[in-house]
Image: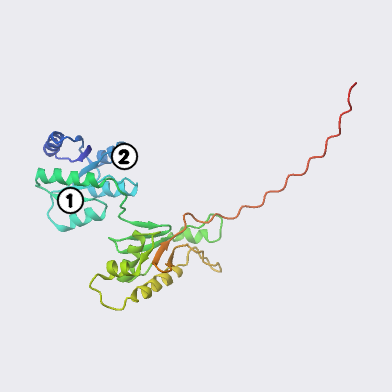
Amino acid sequence: MRVLVVEDERHLSEALQRGLGAEGFAVDVAPTGTDGLWMAREHSYDAIVLDILLPGANGFEVCRTLRSEGNWTPILMLTAKDGELDEAESLDTGADDFLRKPFSFVVLVARIRALIRRGAVERPAVLQVGPLWLDPSAHRSWISCGVPEGTAAAGAARRAREIDLALTPREFSLLEYLMRHSGTAISKHELLEHVWGTGFDGDPNVVEVYVGYLRRKLAEVPLGSDKGEKPLPHGVVVETVRGVGYRLEAPDQPDQPDQPDQPERPEQPEQPEQPEVS
């Protein structure tokens, strides 16, 4: 198993390289955030041990960049700073685990092995379903405008690429759960359990009420509407699956503008027959 250690303290990085090597890992070391980002892009790793306080680019920036580029290699963050904010920010930027210095080497190895067992599964910090986006850590959800160039509405889309959805905390939690399971039918019971909690003893029809709220707010997004222009639909809908529950769906790709008809080729005149030569 190949591990990348991004650590600027030379004594610690050398100790980790020796110790992890003795545990059977192949270890590469990067002394700066910039070097670590380059190596993570150029090589395939089973896990990354990433310090936060780094020259060049800090650990938060490295982790955020890798995740934005679709690199889902498991990341364990290290820091010498004491406090919960670093731990929270590490996890919110896409890290999978966190250790505060000084740490137990035995625990570090165990956590690396656990991360490798999970594998590089896609787990974005920011969710996306079609043009719909949701950032759980920032508690923000928005529609990203996508308007075909050449239309009158394209100018408005360029001026406002993102349109925020004004959601209540409960609506936000409901949308987040539906987005995490987009394309899958979710039962009313499951939504009650995960959004309202197992201790909820109110009217179960509250799910239908909040789905209705979500539908109205999604339908009211005025994508690409210039003055006098009809708003363009973004295609994100919460569908009712009869007998099951609800499913969040979005178009795979935006509709393409109609292509102009191609002029028909004129028919070629028939060639006169050539007389036979005897």
Horizontally, residue 87 falls left or right of residue 132, namely: left
- Place of residue 2 in the rendered image (x, y in percent of width and height, measured from the top left): 23, 36
Residue 253 vertical position relative to residue 3 in the rendered view, above or below: below
Q: Residue at x 50, y 63 (%)?
A: 224
Q: Amino acid at mark 2?
A: Arg
- Disc 2 residue crowd, few under 14, some 14–19, many 20+, Cα 10 Å: few
Q: Residue at x 23, y 50 (%)?
A: 96
- Place of residue 151 in the rendered image (x, y in percent of width and height, measured from the top left): 56, 58
The residue identified by callout 2 is 41
Local secondary structure at mark 2: helix
- Place of residue 259 in the rendered image (x, y in percent of width and height, measured from the top left): 61, 52
Residue 98 vertical position relative to residue 43 in the rendered view, above or below: below
Task: Using the image, tell me which numbered label, if any, was put on residue 98.
Answer: 1
Horizontally, residue 277 falls left or right of residue 145, namely: right
Furthest residue toward right: 278
Examine the rendering and report whether any part of residue 147 can be seen: yes
Q: What distance separates the C-alpha of mark 2 from that of mark 1?
A: 22 Å
State which quadrant residue 138 falls in.
bottom left
Quadrant of the image containing the C terminus: top right
| Nearer the observer, 2 or 131 | 2
Q: Residue at x 28, y 41 (%)?
A: 37
Examine the rendering and report whether any part of residue 52 can be seen: no
Task: Say how many tags the image has.
Answer: 2
Task: Using the image, tell me which numbered label, if any, was put on residue 153.
Answer: none
- Which of pointers 2 and 1 lies earlier in the amino acid sequence? 2
Q: Amino acid at mark 1?
A: Phe
- Place of residue 163 in the rendered image (x, y in percent of width and height, measured from the top left): 41, 64
State which quadrant residue 161 falls in.
bottom left
